[in-house]
Amino acid sequence: MTNNPRNHHLVPQKGYLEKFTNRNKQIFKCKLDVKSLKKIKYFTTTAICYEKDYYKFDNESLLTSYNINDPFYIEKNVFQKYENYLGKIIDKIEAKQSFLTLDDCKKLIFGLVDIKFRNPFFRKSDYSTTINNVANEIINDGSFIEHISKEYNLPIESAINFIYMAKENLKKNSSKDLHSFLLLNRHFESTPIHYYLNFLLLSLEWQILCVPTNNQFITSDNPGFCIESGLLYNTKFTGNFTFIYPLSKNIAIQISSKILSKKSSALKPLTYLYVPYEFVHTINLNTTQIANNEIYGANESVLRSVWNSFQRLKDNSTNKA
């Protein structure tokens, strides 16, 4: 047990948070629940945005269906699927490559969406509803039910009852274990929602937003957001949405449902847009509003400016109420 990782990063340190450091590999952190902002301290990326044993399974019996006996499996294995290549793909975009391979695009989308799913925001979800939906998908999937029937030597009707029983047993677990289990399921199973998100986001044009001189994007403990009809959402991939995700202090990706991608069999074109200071500040402010409680950046003055705008926004909302 002594070799098990205990500090579990809610947002990847490797390949992501490191893209928001200064030349000394330091990153500034600003909390949003403080009443006044004095000196903003800097840290190494290893020292921020983590919680002890956050993805560790307390109920290890949930791992048996995947023939796993390590409660730290997610932290040690699952996230590595994209953390090992995420930074390399972002580097390609920062180098202003005209195209990305579809393989790189799929890996990037999987990583960005998974960072949203692994976030504490989703641990607060209604897991009872989620489990019911997943169970219904499985029950309606004839090939999967047939697999369960053969695997456990059960009649079809008994296999369906097996799924119902598994559903009820699963719902007895804590939100912590349920969140981790769904993350594990996402990495081992191919479900309709994963296919849908990949297909949808790959079918749209990717615009890379570039900051002007002397300005920067920030990130947070819950990066990325969606806008639809002028409203801000953590995620919303329906309707006329726009998905914006800061990739580094210099670039952010913007994917709009209104703009279909130019068709290409093996390469995906990238469009680079230099955006004005005001738009960068708006994106940073939206990042702050979606954050759980912390924002990060390579520049102290940029963080301070966004924090001040966020506080004014909160004060105005309070006064209106």
Image (cartoon, rainbow, N blue to C red):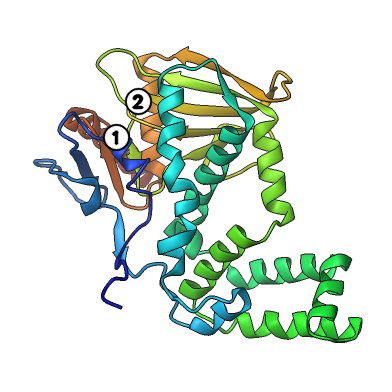
Q: Nearer the viewer, residue 144 or 203?
A: 144
What type is the residue that disc 1 sits on?
Phe
Residue 13 location (% of width, % of height): 32, 47
Is residue 238 visible in the rendered structure shown here? Answer: no
Q: Where the N terminus falls, by quadrant?
A: bottom left
In the drawing, what numbered circle is on residue 281? 2
Q: Quadrant of residue 85?
A: top left
Residue drawn at x 45%, y 53% is 80
- Distance of mark 2 from mark 1, alpha carbons? 16 Å
Q: Quadrant of residue 269?
A: top right
Q: Nearer the viewer, residue 155 or 194?
A: 155
Residue drawn at x 29%, y 43% is 295
Give whichever of discs 2 and 1 has the lower sequence position: 1
In the image, taking residue 27 as reference, residue 243 lies left or right, namely right
Q: How many marks?
A: 2
In the image, taking residue 166 as reference, residue 63 lies left or right, namely left
Q: Nearer the viewer, mark 2 or mark 1?
A: 1
Q: Crowdedness of circle 1 by 10 Å Cα count: few (<14), some, many (20+)? A: many
Secondary structure of the residue carrying numbered label 1: helix
Secondary structure of the residue carrying numbered label 2: helix
The residue to which callout 1 is attached is 20
Q: Quadrant of residue 267?
A: top right
- The answer to whether residue 129 is above or below residue 84 is below
Q: Nearer the viewer, residue 176 or 83?
A: 83
Residue 226 location (% of width, % of height): 54, 38
Is residue 60 visible in the rendered structure shown here? Answer: yes
Residue 266 location (% of width, % of height): 68, 25
Residue drawn at x 78%, y 65% is 137
In the image, taking residue 127 as reference, residue 238 lies left or right, namely right
Residue 44 location (% of width, % of height): 19, 46
What type is the residue that disc 2 sits on?
His
Q: Nearer the viewer, residue 272 or 225?
A: 272
